[in-house]
Amino acid sequence: MIDKTFFRISSLIVLTGLLSCSSGKKEGGEASTKADEYQLIFDGKTLNNWKGDPDYWKVEDGAIVGYTTEEKPLEANTFLIWDGGQPADFELVVDFRISQSGNSGIQYRSEMVEGVPFGLKGYQADIDGNNNYTGQNYEERKRATLAYRGQQVIVNSQEDPNAEVRDNVKKNAWQSTEIVSSLGDIDELKTKIKSEDWNECKLVIKGNLLQHYINGVLMSEVTDNDAVNRKSDGLLGFQIHRGPPMKVEFKNIRYKAL
């Protein structure tokens, strides 16, 4: 006589095993693994692991907020600096929103400025409220504009290696550059950026290739062949630019080492 109880138990064990395998595959599959590669470096509540002037930085509604007022103007640009290391090759994804009068940016591979509290110099993914410069590559306190929005550029060293860096800057742009190709019309690309609303900025920084994306669109690309002035690692931070009263917000800050 066949033991039906045995078959019922055996079937239940097999079914449970199949469900377990299916569940494990879903949780450990390719898409899940990719998502887990990013690390949230802002907890949404505090400025733990960040340092900056508390007169100009706070956390509000799950976002880092940088702001100035008529009563509290800035004499020099100030930065909120990530205290988690000095990344070399990485991806950084940040949601940002900025007031129309705002001027800001995401700083990377940067170094401290001597004598300027919370001052940084180095590469910057530029952000401004009028979206005239948002997406371009600007080097704070060094070579100035490396690539305007819509440009794929090769950056070279100045002809005289002993000259001062600023001697090779004219009209706020580095002179030793080659435009390789166009990524699109500067004004057409501007239409991809929302005004006074949330946008996503993604930086892909690997070796001497520096790519800035806004809302999934490549806005500028720099290949930095300037062995004299380029940096291979450095600090991450957010900028408040001196000027009229402004407000900039950053949230969902995701980092991945490459």
Image (tube, helix red, strand yellow):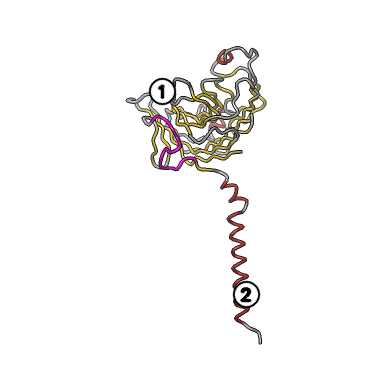
Q: Quadrant of residue 136?
A: top right
Camera-nearest label, 1 or 2: 2
Res 224 quadrant in image: top right
Residue at which label 2 appears:
10
| Helix, strand or loop for disc 1 | loop
Residue 117, image x, y percentages: 42, 24
- The image quadrant where one finds the C terminus is top right
Given the image, on which type of amino acid does mark 1 rest?
Answer: Gly
12 vs 68, nearest the viewer: 12
Q: Badge 1 is on which residue?
A: 243
Q: Is residue 55 magenta?
A: no
Q: Quadrant of the N terminus?
A: bottom right
Residue 60 horizontal/vertical position (percent): 38, 39
Find the magenta span and give its range. Answer: 41-53
Eyeballing the image, is 134 above or below 216?
Answer: above
Three-letter amino acid code at disc 2? Ser
**Quick check: marks 1 and 2 in contact, CB under 8 Å?**
no
